[in-house]
Image: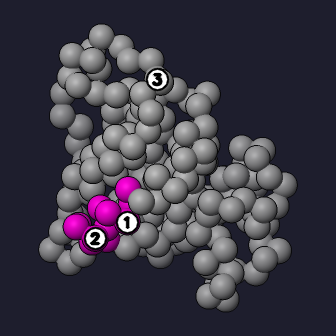
Amino acid sequence: MRYRRAYVQGASYFFTVNLAERNLHLLTEHIGLLRDSFRMVKAAHPFIIDAIVIMPNHLHTIWTLPVGDSDFSTRWGLIKAGFSRKLPCSERVSKSRRSKGERGIWQRRFWEHLIIDDDDYQHHVDYIHYNPVKHGFVKNVFDWPYSSFHHYVSLGLLSMDWTGTESY
């Protein structure tokens, strides 16, 4: 079955990408490998990361694609494959995944949302930055190191004491 995705060239998208086994913490335990995978894909297939948070078992991000380009699926496939290839093989692999040559680290699919306007964009940036607090990993947004929140503070877009809102 093919999923219906909104492919709009040059658009901004919010994504959620999950590990297959939600009890693992591979993304933060191997943050360097994940960052390397993003860097390699961005070099070959440019895009802008507007906001991002890396949680232990999932991530949320907003990307803006170049004018004339709507291919976020290839980028995600390459990021996930690049990260997976560098990890030691220790995960459970189902028969279905094994028959397709898959490792079983990531959920096969990801969730995307086409950003429709400035309010939608801001809501998703705030959601991304508040996510570590929402999941109980930290009490304050600035305490989570794997977030673009710190970049937003350095640009003067947010203050260190920004607390978001609990309406997420």
Residue at 66% across / 74% down in the picture? 150
- Magenta range: 37-47
How far, Cα to Cα, is label 1 from label 2?
6 Å
Which of the numbered marks, if any, corresponds to residue 80? none
Q: Residues within 10 Å of mark 2 (few under 14, many from 20)?
A: few
Give coordinates of residue 22: x percent, y percent: 56, 30
Q: From this viewpoint, is residue 116 visible?
A: no
Q: Which element type, helix, strand or loop, lies under badge 3? A: loop
User: Could you tell me which residue is drawn at 66 percent across and 53 percent down?
Assistant: 131
Residue type indicated by callout 1: Arg
Q: Upstream in the sequence, badge 3 or badge 2?
A: 2
Q: Secondary structure at mark 1?
A: helix
What amino acid type is highlighted by mark number 2?
Ala
Distance CA(mark 3)–CA(mark 2): 29 Å
Quick one: quadrant of the N terminus?
top left
Residue situated in front as seen by the camera: 82 or 9: 82
How far apart are the alpha carbons under marks 1 and 3?
A: 25 Å
Q: Was residue 62 drawn as part of the magenta stretch in this picture? A: no
123 or 73, which is in the foreground?
Answer: 73
Q: Amino acid at mark 3?
A: Glu
Q: Is residue 43 magenta?
A: yes
Instruction: Mark 1: give few (<14), some (14-19) or many (20+) Cα within 10 Å.
Output: some
* Residue at the farthest bottom position: 156
User: To which quarter of the image does residue 125 belong?
Assistant: bottom right
**Could you tell me if the residues under marks 3 and 2 are in contact, i.e. CB atoms within 8 Å?**
no
Residue at label 3? 91
The residue shown at (61%, 63%) is: 147
Q: Are marks 1 and 3 in contact (CB under 8 Å)?
A: no
Between 107 and 89, the one lying in front of the other is: 89
Q: Are marks 1 and 2 in contact (CB under 8 Å)?
A: yes
What secondary structure do most residues of the magenta stretch adopt?
helix
In this figure, which residue is indicated by the disc labeled 2? Answer: 43
